[in-house]
Image: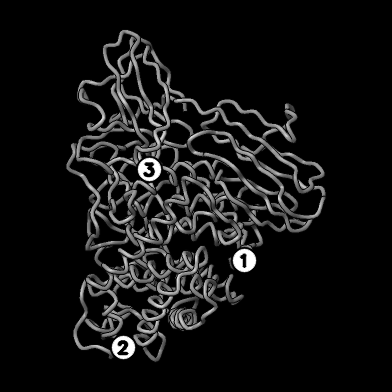
Amino acid sequence: MTVLKELALPYQTLTAIPFTNVSIEDRFWSSRIKATQKSTITACLAQCEATGRISNFAKAGGLEEGGFVGIFYNDSDVYKVLEGIAYSLLIEHDEEMEAQADRIIELIAAAQQEDGYLQTYFTLAEPEKKWTDMNKHEEYCAGHMIEAAIAYKQATGKRLFLDVAIRVADHIDSLFGPGKRHWVPGHQEIELALVKLYVETGEERYWKLAYWLLEERGHGHGVGYSWDRSDWGAAYSQDDVPVRDISSVTGHAVRAMYMYAGMTDAAMLSGDQGYIEALNRIWSNVVDRNMYVTGGIGPSRHNEGFTADYDLPNDSAYCETCASIGMVMWNHRMNLLHGDSKYADIVERAMYNGSIAGVSLSGDKFFYVNPLESDGTHHRVPWYDCSCCPTQIARFIPSIGGYVYATRGNDIIVNQFVEGTGRLSLQAGEITLRQVTEYPWNGRIKLRVEEGEAGAYGIQLRIPAWCKSYRLSVGGLEVADAQIVKGYVRLQREWKPGDEITLELTMQIERVYSHPLVLANEGKVALQRGPLVYCIEEIDNASYDALRVTAATRFRTVYEPELLQGVVAVYAEEPSGDQNFKAIPYYAWDNRDAGQMKVWLPEKTDETRLYRS
């Protein structure tokens, strides 16, 4: 497996460990990675072929006759699948998959114009209108191309795609920036991609262009269809106030997440305190007032995004899959910026619930929208006209190892609990750490120093916010005096190969309550065990409509290996025997016969309950 360089930015607290330094041998995630490689990517490639997304490049390059087919941003789906292929090749080489990618990349290269411009919609349909419409996703598509091209170069060593992407970035840089044209991308993405290109090439002008594009917002430069709509306006694209003045989340959820991710990158490069303060404000607003228990965000179908604080309906929840993955991307960066585990907690919540609910267990059907309650008519489908979510899944799941570890000076940070090995560089030298766990089904994690010179360094383990108690031991001896700082318990000592840590997180079934201003959940309770949010499906519960949770309800868990590829099911029982029900992890719903589903369950109680945040 190729080992990539670690991403180190001057003002970050933690240094990310790339997914290529992490070998996953985890029962939970390995099956999902395999399904992505064998089903998701294959399905997305076939759909990109069948819907004309790939042939648009051949037409734009003069290799085929015909006009543009599809929606103006369709190029981005091809790029995201290629990015997913790159990550998959780094995990397990596949000559046929690489050959398919090479063929598509040659078509992309042929479609590039002499000045570096590349978007097939404008080349084929409206060549005279390039860079005239901020809503038409020119820089959004370019951003996804840049991300894919970097990944493909890292996976294969081949430069063609990266050279194409660099020419696109140089073309954009020639048009926009200080002293040039004003421009506000209608859909953010280019910003974080330009930072990645800077890291790959060392060219500072790329991240400075990203910084400039962020600074363009909120000054009246944005024009176009979405700005002109009275029900959307500038807030739809987060262009209503300068980014450093943001205090509340607005507009389209995915655009917001990509922008906040780009802002966090810019803050880690520049040290801009105004950005850091804005990011802290907006994070609290999103997490405390606008996030579902699944880590999903964006309640409204109308704008694919946000409405008002605490407006979190269940049956009409939009919660786009891309937005949940965007929460993972942004919170991962916030964790690197601040070194606080509360951001890794949100990564975990969105990763295990809102994100992977977007794909079937078979890997070939997808949710765009992820409600927390269904009348039985909402189902995953093989494809959408706007298929950003399937292709997002294709690139997200193979990169999951990149969220597991980080480093800080001479400390290893364990952010996520995933079985496998991590190769980490510390001041003390190169260390290989192995995790053994059945997470998320139980909370027992063993960490063993596998390789490396004996030496003094720290190992910090995240204690999840959901965990009420834990036990920690080293070499079989309990550690009772370890302090928790910013959500991490730190062990500092002389370590040598063979040393073993055991962390036992108590996993209980917790009753979760909303803030009282979330009116949709008044009188209701949700169930969570470890990182997993649970739901009930009609297929398991004949008395679905009559089910209630009471103060006397008792819960037990059973691991069922034949159910939904193996899950811990929760059984609820009343002492009176009047009613019982069964709950499954939310991510696994709609993988059997059609039926109703809900996360928030009516709670019958005579007690006066105070809200607990």
Tell me what residue is drawn at x 46 percent, y 64 percent: 88
Image quadrant in which you'd find residue 207: bottom right
Q: Nearer the viewer, mark 2 or mark 3?
A: 3
Neighbourhood count class around disc 2 (C-alpha, 10 Å): few under 14, some 14–19, many 20 upward: many
Quarter of the image where the N terminus is located: bottom right
Residue placed most toward the observer, 291 or 328: 328
Mark 1 and mark 3: Cα distance apart in space: 31 Å
Tell me what residue is drawn at x 42 percent, y 26 percent: 557
Neighbourhood count class around disc 3 (C-alpha, 10 Å): few under 14, some 14–19, many 20 upward: few
List the residue tagged with mark 3: 565
Tell me what residue is drawn at x 49 percent, y 69 percent: 93
x and y percentages locating residue 511 in the rendered image: 41, 24
Element carrying mark 2: loop
Neighbourhood count class around disc 1 (C-alpha, 10 Å): few under 14, some 14–19, many 20 upward: some
Regarding residue 215, the answer to whether it shows in the image is no
Q: Mark 2 vs mark 3: which is more N-terminal?
A: 2
x and y percentages locating residue 570 in the rendered image: 38, 27
Q: Nearer the viewer, mark 1 or mark 3?
A: 3
Q: Residue furthest front?
A: 562
Amino acid at pointer 3: Gln
Mark 1 and mark 2: Cα distance apart in space: 35 Å
Contact (Cβ within 8 Å) of mark 1 with mark 3: no
x and y percentages locating residue 514 in the rendered image: 38, 29
Tell me what residue is drawn at x 41 percent, y 46 percent: 248
Asked which colour scheme the image uses, the reply is one colour
Q: Is residue 81 above or below residue 157?
A: above
Q: Nearer the viewer, mark 1 or mark 2?
A: 1
List the residue tagged with mark 1: 3
Amino acid at pointer 1: Val
Image quadrant in which you'd find residue 256: bottom left
List the residue tagged with mark 2: 61
